[in-house]
Amino acid sequence: MPWNVLLLRMSAIYGFIGAFLGSHMAGAGSYAFKPIHAHILVVGWLSLFAFSSYYRSYQVPKSSKLAFAHVWTAIIGSLGLTVGMWMYNLNPFNLPGSFTMVFYIVGGSTLLLSFFLFVFMTFKYSESKK
């Protein structure tokens, strides 16, 4: 599957989840999920969609190890950050605080690595598709 399609589909899933959380908060009158909702939309929906647009617009070889690393750190990091934030802030499973904090930090660090790799992608593959 092309990188742009994988990222677009993941973006759509995050968009749906973010919209669902927003409607849930509005209906319940509780804003406990506000930071998670915001990060799902910005990190999941918006960032993955922007990455998808990049892969659709520029010539990136299908065999690029850099693209592989970027795409999977983006997917894993966005999931790890948002789930980690949910577990850390709300702790729905009553897990130890050290576990939820480490999960949150590892997810955020993986996402940060993804953005760092994206910087390299934009310099290495900046030739537009014709």
Image (cartoon, rainbow, N blue to C red):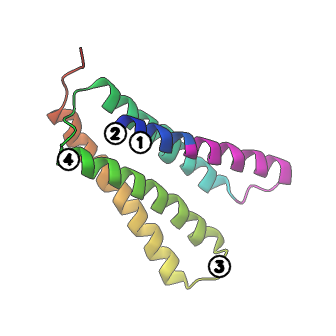
What is the CA distance from the residue labelled 4 to the residue labelled 3?
36 Å
Amino acid of disc 1: Leu
Q: Which residue position is annotated with label 2?
A: 3
Q: Which residue position is annotated with label 1?
A: 6
Q: Position of residue 8 (x, y in %)?
A: 46, 37
Is 92 in the magenta?
A: no
Left or right: 127, with 115 as reference point: left
Q: Residues within 10 Å of mark 4 (few under 14, many from 20)?
A: some
Check disc 1 and report its element: helix, strand or loop: helix
Mark with earlier residue (4, 2): 2
In the picture as drawn, the residue positioned furthest to the front comes out as 1
Residues marked 2 and 1 touching at CB (< 8 Å): yes
Mark with earlier residue (3, 2): 2
Residue 4 found in image quarter: top left
Q: Position of residue 38 (x, y in %)?
A: 59, 48
Amino acid of disc 3: Phe
Is 27 in the magenta?
A: yes
Q: Residues within 10 Å of mark 3 (few under 14, many from 20)?
A: few
Q: Which residue position is annotated with label 3?
A: 93
